[in-house]
Amino acid sequence: MAYLEIENVNVSYGDVQVVNDLSLTVNEGEVVSIIGGNGAGKTTLLKTISGLLTASSGTIKFKGEEIQNRPPEVIVERGLVHVPEGRRLFSLMTVADNLDIGAYNTRAYGQRNHTILGVYDLFPRLAERREQLAMTLSGGEQQMVAIGRGMMALPGLLMLDEPSLGLAPILVLSIFETLRKIADMGTTVLLVEQDVNHSLRLSDRGYVLEHGRVALEGPAKELMDNPHIKEAYLGM
Amino acid sequence: MSALYQSLVNGTMMGAMYGLTALGLTLIFGVMKVVNFAHGSLLMVGMFAAYWLLKITGMHPFLALLIVPPLLFVFGYYLQDLVIKPVFKSERGVREPLTVIIVTTGVWYVLDNLALMLFGAEYRTVRTAISGTSFSMGEVIVSWPKFAGFVVSMLTAVGLWLFMLKTRTGKALRATSMDREAANLMGIDQYKIYNVAFGLGTAIAGVAGCVIIPFYYVYPSVGVVFDIRAFIIVVLGGLGSIPGAILGGVVIGIIESTFAQFMTSTWTEAIIYGIFLLILFFKPSGFFGNKQDW
Ligand SMILES: Nc1ncnc2c1ncn2[C@@H]1O[C@H](COP(=O)(O)OP(=O)(O)OP(=O)(O)O)[C@@H](O)[C@H]1O
Ligand SMILES: [Mg+2]
């Protein structure tokens, strides 16, 4: 049984259908990438999985239970955590409070003082800046808080929407290294990225999304050798 | 000179209570992005609750502080949950939902008219253990009920501030005020948080009712008197700001009491509105700016 199993999901904004009959699975312990150009529907898909948007049809199962059309607070409680595009920090709260609120769900709340040590281990920079307001952090630091805040919720499956967006190449590398560590610690990862090269190298499998449909899927290594991907996404 | 001290002291005490009446408004706006036009009516409900409790039981008004605010919390919580939330939900995704504001106006009319039906239009006062008592500080005479109201207002503001900064629910209120959707992803049910914000705002109106009733009268449309000031204070102090509300209240209170020495109260009203307009022209974000400080 797959950890996350999406079958024939459709999502639209009003009359405009953005995700078409999409199916996708993530197994426990895997790192899976979703790649695709601007407007392919990646963010829409993640928002539908985490409950911010509702699917008009199809099923989404997490750990065997249907979660489609449940609200986000219920889905987080079950261990499916979404780190949104554009970081979305609570800008007038301190780093420590942002992390603290990440552990709001009752499953994670009791352990938050322990979990935060692990997050500070992952991002020592955040420990130094714990009393600083999130809005005053650099872009890279903000992304660390966003990921750390996701980890505070004790995810079984962590979904990240373009964590490398807008970061300098060296920071992009360090974000991907961190994701490697998170995966090695046993968290299943579903990663949406435009940095196809890095994300496929990190992943076990990948899906290519075009116009809200799965255009290609397979082991990450095979995708990297695929001529279409080389041309369209890797610029080779 | 002593007349000036006297009016400064009076103005500060009254002003802190005006600030108290504005706290709930600023809290609800900060979290929900809704201007609650029913706020004055909630204050009226708080005053009537305190009035009847004191009238019937004859208890000390300080004791009423332990009873009225929790009752008003429950009232506000369910008012939002049952009446306002459904409208809110149908406007999900809108940052400053207009129809919700219209609903709060409806609540205002319903509550005021309900009070009129139940209690009639007359002005009511109740003598409490502290009514009419005073003590002197040098040449200045300080009225006990106003002094108590001042202290309670300050404690309420500090308590609310600490609650927002330190507690799980307080942090959830702040997070929701900054980014509803992101807060939702943290597992915060925004509608429950709105209930809590509305409940707290109403509970604070209950606190205000308890401290005002020992020296003021209550009638069904009494909310309007405080409401207009509360709106001015909230704009003056900065929408969403807790210290801004208290500071704004004190400024209004002092203007009112000191200027009253030199002119009629119609003029002080005009001056208050004049300052309000000047603030809107030159610093529309108020003393503490748009930077919500909790
Ligand atoms: N709130 C919305 N209302 C209407 N249309 C929307 C909304 N959000 C997204 N869309 C549309 O849905 C399509 C998919 O958007 P989505 O944000 O899911 O793409 P994406 O793959 O995440 O793109 P990007 O890589 O640029 O983030 C786009 O055509 C977009 O214009
Ligand atoms: Mg996107």
Image: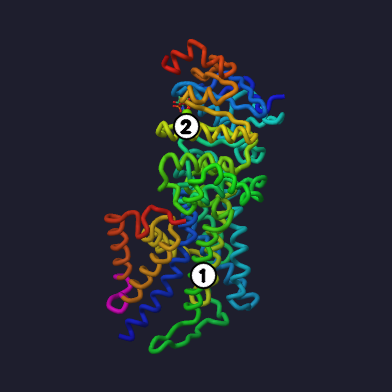
Q: Which residues are magenta?
A: B259-267
Residue B44 coordinates in the image, percent (x, y):
52, 64
Q: Is residue A118 left or right of residue A145?
A: right
Residue under the image location 72 percent in, 24 percent down: A1
Residue under the image location 49 percent in, 41 percent down: A144
Residue under the image location 44 percent in, 23 percent down: A38
Regarding mark 2 in the picture, which secondary structure is present there?
Answer: helix
The residue carrying pointer 1 sits among few (fewer than 14), some (14 to 19) or many (20 or more) residues within 10 Å by Cα, namely few
Quadrant (top left, top right, bottom left, bottom right) of the C terminus of chain A = top left
Is residue A213 something that shows in the picture? yes
Amino acid bearing label 1: Leu
In this view, A185 is above or below B214: above
Q: Nearer the viewer, mark 2 or mark 1?
A: 2
Judging from the image, mark 2 belongs to the subunit labelled A
Query: In this figure, which residue is indicated by the disc labeled 1?
Result: B155
Task: From the viewer's side, name the closer residue of A78 and B29.
Answer: A78
Q: Is residue A221 left or right of residue A169?
A: right
Regarding mark 1 in the picture, which secondary structure is present there?
Answer: helix
How many numbered marks are there?
2
Judging from the image, mark 1 belongs to the subunit labelled B
In this view, B30 is above or below B233: above
The colour scheme used here is: rainbow
Q: Which mark is residue A173?
A: 2
Q: Which of the 4 image quadrants contains residue B257? A: bottom left
Residue B61 coordinates in the image, percent (x, y):
58, 76
Q: Is mark 2 within 8 Å of ligand 1?
A: no
Q: Which of the 4 image quadrants contains residue B267? A: bottom left
In this view, A17 is above or below B132: above
The residue carrying pointer 2 sits among few (fewer than 14), some (14 to 19) or many (20 or more) residues within 10 Å by Cα, namely some
